[in-house]
Structures are given as structure tokens and as C-alpha cells.
Image (cartoon, rainbow, N blue to C red):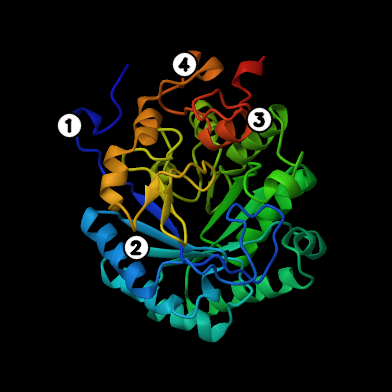
């Protein structure tokens, strides 16, 4: 078996991207919330000084991209101070937000704090559908106001859109809305039933055939789409891009290879991949692969990254079932979060993959 990047040297390169949930507090009650956010902040959240210390460690380690999310990061009073500290350390800093608290003043303050991109959650092209999914009437209207505020402030933003059975027919309209709104990218999150989604979205995730159709449609749409389309939780998407030899008309083809899992597969816990840190300091391989690797209050982030048996197993790519026999094992590996959520075994075959049913 080929050694993944950096493993043969004994020192695993740090993740390219880390998402840090700075608070569990949120002003919405979304059905699919992976963090199972709450109305009030958790009492064990990292303090401001602990948050800054964590960011110092990440910067010194060589992490290049930090996403501040939650909960809703704007619900934390010292959010801007945390973001400013991160950007001052030379880390590209972005946030994931529901857009509800994004007005012109906040967008301007975020830009001054050094935030370089905002991912705004838009889960339908229809306001009432978005509102029902997000648990609050008027959420779509306020989120779109946040989009306008970012655009007017010159703060780059992208759309984060959940793919589920109920909105499958809306995918073209959702992509068109992202483009028309001036988004810099469109991220379609392939719904995985973890966190609150295990109960509130039971049965809403796509089956393998539906997933195949969506990924092939998105890949073909990328030809004429002026912005990059990404699909977290579906590394098979980049296989389609390669198989169809997709050549975008509006930007260089190599821009597609900047998708974090392009040519390398599931990025959870992988060298130059991805890591998630919860508001209380607990570390997991991914927001979808919710296995506790340890807490930064007890061990340094680098020690957890280098020594975790769970991460070592993930990096081995010793997969099971259909994934173990797949020709794309090393460059795809399926979604480890979905495998774990549905089977209890993070190394099991990805039950959402359609390659085994291809004609």
C-alpha cells in the first residue's frame, strides 16, 4: 500500500484547514445542525485567552486556513477579537455563518478584522423552505440581507447549501441564486445524518442513485458556471470532474484542483487535510466524523495530531467492503463520516457511493 503524504517521515504534515467552533450558542434551531447548537453558550467553552493560545499554536504549526464557526460565531461577544488575532498571525481566516447578524456595520468590521471570506448558509431558493429548515420565520430574508451587506462591504462570500431529498429539484435554482448574488463559490453540502440531523433529518440524505445524478449534474454545470462548485462530504464528486474532463470556461481548470480533497479523497485527519476543534477544546477528525481524539486543554494539538490511534488508522486507508476493492481507494476513500454514522465503523465502505451500482 502506498504511504500517504508525509507518513513515511514519521512527522505528519499539519492540516491545511482547521475549523474551530468558537461557541455553541446559536440564534437558530437548524434541523441538520452537526454541532447540536444551543440557545446559550456552553459553560466550558474556551476562554478568550485559551482561544488566542490555540490560534498561536495553529499559526506556529503551519496551518494555512482557519474557519471560525459554531453554533453561530457572531453570537460570541469577542468574535471580532478572535478573528483579528487569527488574521494577525498570518492565517487565512474565514467564518461560517447563518447570516442573521450580518449587517453593513458588522461586514465592515469583519473586513477590518482581516476576515477574508464568509460562508453564508442558504438552504433553498425559496424563503419558506429555508426558514422551515432553519427553524425561524424570516431567516432567509435576513440571510440574504447579510449577503448584500458583505457584497457592499467588498467582503468575499460564498454560499453553503445543504443537499437533501426535499430540495433535490432546487439544485439548479440554488446554484443560480449563488451566482446572481455575487458569491465567489458555491458549496453544496452532501447531508450526512449526524448531530441533530440523526433525528430531525432522518431519511433526508440522498440515496446512491440520487447522489450520482446530482454530482454528474453539478460537474456538467461547472463548465458554464463562473464560480467554483465544491461538494463537501462527497469526494466522489472530483472523480466525476476528472472522468468527464470538465474544463470550466470562466477560469483556469487548475482552479478545480484546489478543492481540498481533489486527487486525495476524504480529508478528515489527513496530512495537509482537515481537523475540527469544538468550542470546549475537543478535537475530532471532521465535523461529520464525530470521534473525540482528545482535548487541547489536556494535550497539545500537535500531540493529538501526531499520536492519535484513530488518525493513524484513518491515514492507513485500510478500508473495508466495496471501498477496499475500489480502484479509486487512494484518491477518494469515500466519506468516512457517512461510513461511521451509518455503520459505527469509520473504515467501512461509504454507503452513499454509487460506483458499485454503475452500469
Q: Which residue is mark 1?
A: 9
Q: Earlier in the sequence, mark 3 or mark 1?
A: 1
Residue 304 visible: yes
Residue drawn at 28 percent across, 58 percent down: 58
Q: Position of residue 273 (x, y in %)?
A: 37, 43
- Determine whether, in the image, residue 80 is placed left or right of residue 194: left
SS category of the residue bearing label 4: loop
Q: Which residue is mark 3?
A: 212
In the image, 103 versus 280, the foreground residue is: 280
- Above or below for 314 versus 171: above
| Alpha carbons under labels 2 and 1: distance apart | 27 Å
Residue drawn at 26 percent across, 60 percent down: 57
Q: Residue furthest left?
A: 9
Pointer 4 local density, CA inside 10 Å: few below 14, some 14–19, many at least 20: few
Q: Quadrant of residue 219?
A: top right
Q: Earlier in the sequence, mark 1 or mark 4?
A: 1
Q: Which residue is mark 4?
A: 327
In the image, 66 versus 303, the foreground residue is: 303
Pointer 3 local density, CA inside 10 Å: few below 14, some 14–19, many at least 20: many
Q: Which residue is mark 2?
A: 92
Amino acid at each position: 500500500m502506498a504511504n500517504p503524504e508525509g507518513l513515511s517521515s514519521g512527522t505528519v504534515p499539519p492540516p491545511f484547514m482547521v475549523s474551530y467552533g468558537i461557541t455553541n450558542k446559536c440564534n437558530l434551531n437548524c434541523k441538520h445542525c452537526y454541532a447540536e447548537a444551543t440557545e446559550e453558550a456552553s459553560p466550558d467553552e474556551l476562554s478568550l485567552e485559551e482561544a488566542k493560545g490555540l490560534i498561536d499554536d495553529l499559526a506556529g504549526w503551519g496551518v494555512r486556513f482557519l474557519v471560525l464557526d459554531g453554533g453561530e460565531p457572531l453570537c460570541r461577544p469577542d468574535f471580532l477579537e478572535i478573528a483579528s488575532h487569527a488574521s494577525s498571525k498570518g492565517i487565512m481566516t474565514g467564518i461560517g455563518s447563518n447570516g442573521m447578524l450580518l449587517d453593513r456595520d458588522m461586514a465592515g468590521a469583519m473586513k477590518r478584522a482581516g476576515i477574508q471570506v464568509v460562508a453564508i448558509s442558504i438552504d433553498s431558493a425559496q424563503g419558506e423552505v429555508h426558514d422551515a429548515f432553519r427553524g425561524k420565520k424570516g431567516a432567509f430574508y435576513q440571510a440574504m440581507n447579510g449577503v448584500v451587506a458583505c457584497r457592499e462591504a467588498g467582503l468575499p462570500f460564498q454560499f453553503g447549501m445543504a443537499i437533501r431529498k426535499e430540495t433535490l429539484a432546487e439544485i439548479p435554482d440554488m446554484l443560480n441564486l449563488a451566482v446572481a448574488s455575487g458569491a465567489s463559490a458555491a458549496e453544496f453540502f452532501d447531508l450526512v445524518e449526524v448531530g441533530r440531523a440523526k433525528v430531525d433529518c432522518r431519511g433526508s440524505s440522498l440515496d446512491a442513485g440520487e447522489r450520482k445524478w446530482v454530482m454528474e449534474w453539478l460537474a456538467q454545470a461547472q463548465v458554464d458556471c463562473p464560480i467554483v462548485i465544491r461538494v463537501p462530504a462527497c469526494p466522489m464528486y472530483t472523480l466525476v470532474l476528472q472522468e468527464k474532463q470538465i474544463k470550466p470556461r470562466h477560469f483556469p481548470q487548475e482552479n478545480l484542483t484546489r478543492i481540498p480533497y481533489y486527487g486525495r479523497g476524504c480529508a478528515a485527519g489527513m496530512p495537509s487535510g482537515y481537523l475540527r476543534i469544538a468550542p470546549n477544546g475537543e478535537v475530532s477528525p471532521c465535523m461529520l466524523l464525530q470521534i473525540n481524539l482528545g482535548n487541547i486543554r489536556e494535550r497539545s494539538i500537535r500531540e493529538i495530531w501526531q499520536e492519535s490511534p484513530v488518525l493513524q488508522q484513518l491515514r492507513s486507508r485500510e478500508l473495508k467492503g466495496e471501498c477496499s476493492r475500489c480502484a479509486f481507494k487512494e484518491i477518494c476513500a469515500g466519506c468516512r463520516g457517512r461510513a461511521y454514522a451509518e455503520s459505527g465503523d469509520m473504515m467501512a465502505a461509504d454507503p452513499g457511493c454509487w460506483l458499485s451500482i454503475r452500469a
